[in-house]
Structure formats: structure tokens, C-alpha cells
């Protein structure tokens, strides 16, 4: 009878301790880490969407502006470089690779901006329905990229705050010390604080 009572008591204690641990934030760190990875996945998704639109945009412009070879080549090369850098959730643990990826994306953004400035010289291109549709999709994608970056920054902030404050700091040092502080998104483009002057 005593052993059965002892077993019941241990089980009740174990269940109570489990309940206490679930309410004290022990799961916050891995939860927030997964949210960071999901937010980063959305950033990648939107960059890929932009990269997928570029070949059609270049082909449309090429039909009207053959003499703009240099600009078109710059866009194609920037897209190739941006898509050649393979990133995934593990990239978040490598700030140097993350910065390299972001620099390639910034170069692509700059090349696209130059292409849109060139388009101003071709009124018949600006009125082409294919071009207008692609331009609208590209503009929407740029907005989605901005939103995805914002969400990523917020997720990184939540995660980093959790592992640097009580009680998350304790859980991090005891259970999750292999999970590093995450780098947030940083604009690496020249004059990133100023909006580009592009007229459509």
C-alpha cells in the first residue's frame, strides 16, 4: 500500500512540476526561434517572387529598348547573383552569409531601380499592358518584401528579448545555450535611409 501511495505521490508531483514548467516560459525560446525561421522563410519567399518576375520584365523591356543592353544585362546579372546564393533557416546562424545574401538582394534592387528610370524614355513601353501588369506585380512584391522584413525584425526582437531577460535568460543558459542571439535585418544598400527617386 505504501509503495502505491508513493508512486501516486511521485506522479502527482511530476504532473504538478510539468504544469509549473509549461507556465513559466520554458517553451518560449524554441517557439520564438521557430517564429524567426518562419518569418525568414517569408522574406526568402518574397525575394524569390521578385526574382521570378524579372525575366518577364526584362523580355518586355528588351522588345522596346534594345539599345539599353547595359542596363538589361546589369539586371540579369544581379538576378543571377541574388538567386545563386542559397539560403535557408541555417543562414540565420551565419551573419556573414546573411549579409552576403542581403547585399546581393540590394544590388538587384538597385539594378531594378535603374531599369525603371530607363523605362521613362520609352512612352510606348510605359503604355504596354504586359509591362504595366509586370510593373504592378513588381511594385506589390516590393511592398511584400518590406512587410516580410518588418515581420522578421519583430520576430528576431521577440526572440532576442526572451533570451536576454528573466526568466528566459535562465532557460537559455540551462537548456538552450546552443541557440544563438539572432542577427536582425540591416539595410546594406548605399544611401538606404533615402528613398530612391524613381518615376513611373
Image (cartoon, grey):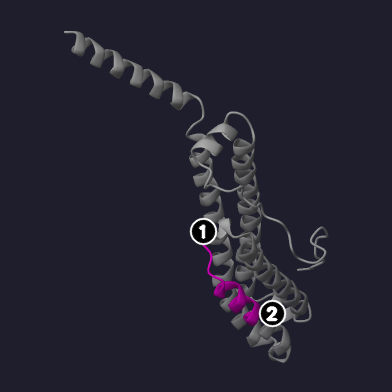
Q: Quadrant of the N terminus?
A: top left
Distance in Å between CA atoms under marks 1 and 2: 42 Å
Question: Residue 118, located in which quarter of the rendered image?
Answer: bottom right
Residue at x-position 66% and y-position 51% = 184
Residue at x-position 65% and y-position 82% = 61
Which residue is nearer to you in this view: 110 or 3?
3
Of the residues under marks 1 and 2, which one precedes in the sequence? 1
- Tell me where residue 29 appears, x and y as whole percent: 52, 39
Question: Does the residue at mark 1 contact the one at mark 2 (Cβ under 8 Å)?
Answer: no
Q: Residue furthest front?
A: 2
Question: Residue 134, located in which quarter of the rendered image?
Answer: bottom right
For numbered disc 2, what is the local secondary structure? Answer: helix
Q: Quadrant of the C terminus?
A: bottom right
Nearer to us of marks 1 and 2 is 1
Q: Which mark is residue 36?
A: none
Left or right of 3 in this view: 89: right
Q: Which residue is mark 1?
A: 90
Q: Which residue is mark 2?
A: 125
Q: Residue furthest top?
A: 1
Q: Main secondary structure of the magenta part?
A: helix
- Tell me where residue 54 appears, x and y as whole percent: 60, 74
Query: Circle 2: is it few (<14), some (14-19), or many (20+) Cα within 10 Å?
Result: some
Above or below, 148 against 109 in this view is above
- Tell me where residue 49 appears, x and y as whole percent: 55, 65
Is 85 magenta? The answer is yes
Is 169 magenta? The answer is no
State which region is magenta: 76-89
Which residue is nearer to you in this view: 10 or 22?
10
For numbered disc 1, what is the local secondary structure? Answer: helix
Above or below, 67 against 90 in this view is below
Amino acid at each position: 500500500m505504501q509503495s502505491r501511495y508513493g508512486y501516486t505521490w511521485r506522479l502527482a508531483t511530476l504532473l504538478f512540476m510539468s504544469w509549473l514548467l509549461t507556465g513559466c516560459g520554458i517553451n518560449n525560446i524554441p517557439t520564438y526561434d521557430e517564429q524567426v525561421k518562419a518569418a525568414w522563410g517569408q522574406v526568402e519567399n518574397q525575394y524569390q517572387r521578385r526574382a521570378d518576375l524579372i525575366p518577364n520584365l526584362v523580355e518586355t523591356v528588351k522588345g522596346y529598348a534594345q539599345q539599353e543592353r547595359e542596363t538589361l544585362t546589369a539586371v540579369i546579372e544581379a538576378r543571377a547573383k541574388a538567386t545563386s546564393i542559397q539560403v535557408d533557416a541555417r543562414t540565420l546562424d551565419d551573419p556573414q552569409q546573411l549579409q552576403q545574401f542581403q547585399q546581393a538582394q540590394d544590388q538587384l534592387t538597385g539594378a531594378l531601380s535603374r531599369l525603371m528610370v530607363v523605362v521613362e524614355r520609352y512612352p510606348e513601353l510605359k503604355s504596354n499592358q504586359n509591362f504595366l501588369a509586370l510593373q504592378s506585380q513588381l511594385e506589390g512584391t516590393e511592398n511584400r518584401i518590406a512587410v516580410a522584413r518588418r515581420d522578421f525584425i519583430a520576430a528576431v526582437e521577440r526572440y532576442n528579448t526572451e533570451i536576454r531577460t528573466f526568466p528566459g535568460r535562465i532557460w537559455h543558459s540551462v537548456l538552450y545555450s546552443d541557440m544563438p542571439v539572432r542577427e536582425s535585418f540591416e539595410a546594406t544598400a548605399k544611401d538606404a535611409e533615402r528613398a530612391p527617386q524613381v518615376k513611373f
